[in-house]
Each structure stands twice: as structure tokens, then as C-alpha cells.
Amino acid sequence: MMKYFYALLLSFIAHFSYSQQTQNWNSAEILLHLKKLKVLGTVLYVAAHPDDENTRLLAWLSKEKLYRTGYLSITRGDGGQNLIGDEQGIELGLIRTQELLAARRIDGAEQFFTRAYDFGFSKSTDEAMRIWDKEKILADVVWIIRKFQPDVIVTRFPEDNRAGHGHHSGSAVLAHEAFKAAADANRFPEQFKYGVRPWQAKRIMWNTFNFGNTNTTSENQFKVDVGAYNALLGKSYGELAAESRSQHKSQGFGVPSSRGAALEYFSLLEGDAPVTELLDGVITGWEKVKGGKVIASAIDVIIKNFSFTQPEKSVASLVKLYQSVEALADGYWKEQKLKEIQKLIEACSGLYMEASTNQEYAVQGDSVRIGFWINNRGGVKAELRNVSFDKFDSSLNKGLAANTNFNFVKTFAVPDDKPLSQPYWLKDQMLKGSFVVNNQQLIGKPQNGPAYEAVFKTVIEGKEFVFTKPVQYKHTDPVKGELFQPLAIFPPFSVRIRPEIYIGLVGAYFTRTTTSYKSNNRVLIKLGDPLEPSLSHDSAIMQRGEVRIKEESWDVDQIPDKDGNVEFPIIWQFKNKRTNDLTYDVVSINYDHIPSINYFKPAKIKIEHFEWKTDGKKIGYIKGAGDKVPEALQQMGYELNFLEEKDITADNLKQFDAVVAGVRAYNVHEWLNTVNDVLNDYVKNGGNFLVQYNTNSFVGPARFKMGPYPFVISRNRITDEDSKVNFPDPANELLNWPNKITDKDFEGWVQERGVYFADQVDPNYKAILSMKDPGEAELKGSLIAARYGKGRFIYTGLAFFRQLPAGVPGAYRLFANLIANPNSKNDGATK
């Protein structure tokens, strides 16, 4: 079944790959957008994370009711788990941001975010508000409401514990308070200098739900049927919703399509109660705008005369419509509808404009060669006045013949100080619960604008229009064909240090990889303060694309603060000029279903000074859904062998001191259920088998086969990373050998203690630890172990997958104990 699931997942990725031909509206989509011109209504949906949104409702609002529809996700989902790779934290947030944008391209809604950071599961609204800094995030929600001007606001979750997550309930609290604060001129008045004004939505509703064992719907609530079939799109809104939601691939949220009537329920939170429509009492036609009745009549005529086979025949009428709207008094809907009409003119005319390069990136201090293309495919009356790019401006005044390509290529210098393509929320050092964004106009935006844009100034049917197109990297894949990706601005070179965290005491050994992104780079790499004098350097002329790998080492005695830890950057010299600028490590994230992602983090090394012992050498590792535990184990000196189904045999397993299952291994490998007897025999004959956390999404008491004795994987977790850890069985060997585990080993943990603890545990298991979140009962399922025959089986929900990459000393010491085979005790190897 799981093999089929992954085959289906890959087919979704291929079908909805971002890296395909540029998107063009067909005639059915054009007609749908013509109809949308008549509608002047706006709805904002608010929830906490990517994948929280109701995609069926969003699709119905956007493509059936034709409202301007937005989804505000309070966070970018940074604290979740990743099914498709090993990215965590801000890297996972980057992926989930793009997955949301991929979903919005399908359901037609717009995407917004606040500066809040997803710090992991939260059990209370109060905790979420405290860590996020409530006033800061509330200001963001108010800002987005004032800019978007929704007539109705809808929350996904209630404001109490029925939401199931402190972020969920927190998103509802923020939306409700912002509903009132956005209309209050005394709240966040500093925003008004940026062009917004107080805005009062008509009502705020809670979109009630029936999830699992929680049913918050009732027949006396307001409800609408959102399961209609859209003949222009050839799909029902349940089908569109499935396509949209299935973009959340990092969360494994591929879902089947649904068809037929589907009721959505709503509970009024504040404002006037609706009777028949969600936007009851809101004027949603052109009568909302002074002089708008004439506009509505003109749109009706355009729709009536629209030709599916010759949409270009509507261009002249659309140009006149544009001029009529342009003559109206300035206002929100004038601005919005002018954008919509211009897009329709472009679509109906078939006008194709492109600015592209065959360079994957443009480099500071180098040059970029860009090709400009335009084709009047529909043969409308059009002229290209000029093309401008950066400081380049060409005067062309060229008539555009029907379906004839006009193109030219020009090389441009990239300034040394051209900003890198760093996601705007990562430019400054973030706080624990939120990103730092000092530019008010960026707040709420899902991502940066393009690195470069080309401006095509045209005249269509006698009216001048300016079209702005992003410069993209274009290439041809022999399998996928012509592909487009965002063009990124790179530094002249990057430096990657591996490992980023060094935990040894005897000597520091690392690999430095220097990559040049331009030709004739004179590069001098030096380890920065506090190491004096610099211990590592490399001066060389490097060519574009050249990669140099060098192994480095130094004595720990040369590193200060050897009783604690030290973190230092890499500094660099460029063009014979010494600078104090940081060298960057270029991190690229590539998946077919989203655009390529690049971000830049300072190249640095973190040295952790602590003592630990290991016992045993050879480890068999079963990879799960993606984690960086194997890299940490290799750095500790273990020899790792990665195991697949064919490797799970009695003869093969007996060579290993321990076998470790990676995070969610049982969720992604159904075959693990079929080899449980083999693994149990390995334990029985003296082996040591450690299973890291699995979710109960696919694993339950009736389905999974794990370990020699029964237990249930629960949803229990400890979210307070500083919660006190108790030792119910202090003499247990897991706490004493080869490392003595104390309270100190649980200091400095990040994000959480653990997730998906064991429950309903067979008496043969011993609880090694107990802990609790504030105000809750003690939990004993974070780490359980049982002797079976000559060996030992362990299940742990402790978040080692976060602690080891973060360099938490106690996590390393405890993990060493868990994989030390109790049948081969010796004094341990001190590190």
C-alpha cells in the first residue's frame, strides 16, 4: 500500500510540476475571469499553518462566487515534520511557503503570511501568544486586513481547546481581535502613513468542522453547499480542492477527489448574521462604485459577444472598458479591476512576452545575458514602444505583426552590491518566535519579488499598457522539455563547512567546499575571530563553476573557551581587498512540485566541548521520512550501514551492534510490518533495536507490528523543551552506561522534548523517563525499553532528530547509551 502511495505521490509531483511551460489561460478560463470582473466582493480566510486551509471552500469562493479570496497563514509551517526530505526549521518553512503558492495557483486564492514562526506544537493559546509576541503578530493581521479589505473574515478554528493546537486557537484569537482593531483608528496608527486606512469587515465567521472525534457543526448553523460542478473548468470544487491540497507534499497530504454536494458550516463570531449568502448585506456588484453601473453593462456586452475560438475579438472592447474604469475616482476596486482587465487583454490577445536567460543564477560583480521575446499571437492591433530592464531602456516603436517573433539579446553587468536573492524574512537574525522584517510593505507578502524584471511598454488598440515580466532561467530538460525557474542573485563564491557542528575533543576535522560562481575569482578564505592567528587559508584564482574541496584540521588547544562552546564565522578577501563581510553557504532546495529555492546562510563552524562515551561500532540504519541523525552518528565515530528490505535477514543483522529505525520509518515502509519477526529474532539473539518516533497516522494498534511486546503510539508529546525530566528507574543501564545521564543532559534542548509517545504499554517494558508540560499529568512514554531474550528493544519519541543536528550535548550522550549493545559492555570509548 505504501509503495502505491509513493507512486501516486510521484505522479502528482510530475503532473503538477511548477517547472513546466508558462501558464496561459484558455478560453474557458478567460470567460470565468470576465465574469469575475462583475464581482466586487472579498473574503479572507485565516488559519495557523500551511495545510490548515479549507481548499474546497477557497476554490468555491474564488471560482464559483468569483470573490477576491485570500488565505492568511499565521506561520509558514517551519516547525512541522517533513515527509519528502530532511529539511527542518526555516528550510521546511521555505518549502511549505512554495507548496501553499502552488495550491493557490490551483484554487485561485491569494496567499499571505505574518512574521510568526512555527515553533512546533503548542498546547495553549497563551503559550503561542507569548512566544510569538501577540501585539507584533496582531499588527500584521491588522495590516493585511487593511490592505486586502475583506468584506467577510472566516477562521478555520475556534478560540478554545477544540482547535487542538495553541497555534490553531491563537490564529482564531488574532483574527477576531484584528476584526475589531483594523477598524479602530487608534490601533496601530503607524500603518496609515503607508497608504492603508481603517477597515471594518461586515462579519467574522468560524468555519466549523467535523474532524476525527470532534464535531463542531450543527444544523442550526449557517451553511452553504460548496460541492458544485464548474463546467468551464470541467471539475467540481471537491476535485479542485484535492488538487490544491495535494500540493502539501512535505506533509503527505495527497487526498482523493470528492464529487457531489458538500455542505460547509459557519458560526457567527461578530457582525451581522448572514441569511442566504456568506456576503449577505455586502454590495458585491459595480453599484458599489460611483459610476459603476455603466461599467457593469459594458462587461455584460463583452461576455455576451465573447468568442471561444477568437478571444482576440474582445480586446478592443476590453481596452475601452479599461479606459472607462481608469476614469473613475481612485479607490480600492478601481485599482484591482484595472489589474484584472489588463490581464484579460493580455490573455485574449495571446500576446506573449518573455525575458529569460540560460544562466541558472546571476552573480554579484559579473554579468547576465538576457533574451527578450514578444509575439502577437492573436494578431491584434499592437505596437511595442520599448523594452526596459534595470538601467537599460530601448526605444523601438515597432509594429507587431501577427504571430511573428521579435526578439533580441543583451548582456548586462550585475553590480557588486546587487542584493542576494535572500527570502526577505531571513535577512535579519530572527527572534525565538518571529521573524524580523523592518520594511512594512513586505509584511504579509508570501515571497520576494523577482530578482530582475523586464518592462514591455506596448500600445494595444491605441492605448498604452505596461507589462512587467520576471526574468527567468530557461532550460530544456530531455525528459520534461522546456522549463522555467526563478533567476537568483548569487555571491561570487560560497563556502560550505561540513560538519557545521563539531563535537570532538581531540582535534577538529572538517571539509571546506569552495564553489566559484564567476570566472577569475581571487579567493582568500580565512577562519575568522576568535581564532587568532587564522589557522586556515586558501588563495587561488577560480573559474566559474569550479569547486575546490579541502580537508582542514586544528588542535583544540588553539580554540578558546574549551569548557563550553564557540561559534565563529568565515571571513573572506575578494579582489585583493580585505572585508569583514561574511562568506555565505548557498543552500539550494529542489523538488519538482515547487520552484527551486535558494537561500544564503553565513558559513560558520560551531565547536561543542563535552565528554561522551560510545560502546559498539557498527550500526544498521533504516532510513525514515528524512532526518539528519545518521550524519550525527557518523561524526560520533560509528560505522553506518543503511538497510533496505532485502537486508533484513538473520545472517545480515547479526553483524550489527545496534539497528536503528529513522523517524517515521514505519510510516513510510510498509515492509517493516512484514519483517518484525526477523527483527525480534535479532533482538532475541542479543541484538539492540532502537525505533525512533512514528506517527499514528498510518500506525495504530490494529495495524503496526513493532517490537516483541504490544504498545500503542499515541499523540502524547511534551512541547516545553525546558520541562523537568525525571528518572523513574535511575539504576537502569540506559541512564548509566556508557554515559551517566543526569538533569544536565536535558539542558539546552530545542523546540520540544518529544512527540508521539508510547501508551498502553505492555508490562514487559520499562519507562526510563517521565516528564510533563505545565499543568498536565506526568507522561512516561517518551522512552520505553524491554529485554527480550538476550537483547533489547527500545522505542523513543524523544526529538533526537532535532537535538542532534542542533548539537545538544545531552542528546548525543543519551543516544550513545541507547545504541550501546548491553551484551558487549566495556569501559566505553571516551570522546
Image: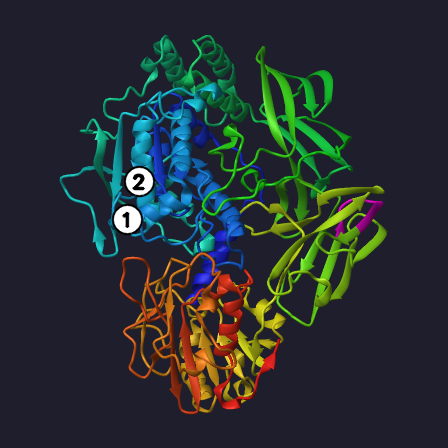
State yes or no: residue 535 in magenta. no
Give how far across and how far down residue 265 sits, in percent.
Answer: 22, 40
Residue at 64% across, 44% down: 482
Residue 285, quarter of the rendered image: top left
Q: Tell me the residue that label 2 is attached to.
A: 172
Q: Tell me the residue that label 1 is attached to.
A: 163
64 up-or-down from 769: above or below: above
Q: Is residue 743 visible?
A: yes
The residue range painted magenta reads 515-524
813 up-or-down from 358: above or below: below
State yes or no: residue 523 in magenta. yes
Cα–Cα gap, marks 1 and 2: 9 Å
Give how far across and how far down residue 340 sits, in percent.
Answer: 47, 23
Q: Is residue 108 visible?
A: no
Whether residues under marks 1 and 2 lie with C-beta atoms below 8 angstroms apart, the answer is yes
Q: For the residue marked with disc 1, what is the amino acid?
A: Ala
734 up-or-down from 230: above or below: below
Residue at 19% across, 45% down: 217
Circle 1 Cα neighbour tier, 10 Å, few/some/many (<14 / 14–19 / ≥20): many
Residue at 41% across, 30% down: 144
Residue in front for this viewpoint, 227 or 404 = 227
Residue in front for this viewpoint, 526 or 625 = 526
- Give the farthest residue toward the left: 220
Q: For the residue marked with disc 2, what is the amino acid?
A: Ala
Identify the image quadrant of the N terminus: bottom left
Circle 2 Cα neighbour tier, 10 Å, few/some/many (<14 / 14–19 / ≥20): many
Give how far across and how far down residue 493 sits, in percent.
Answer: 75, 47
Q: Main secondary structure of the magenta part?
A: strand
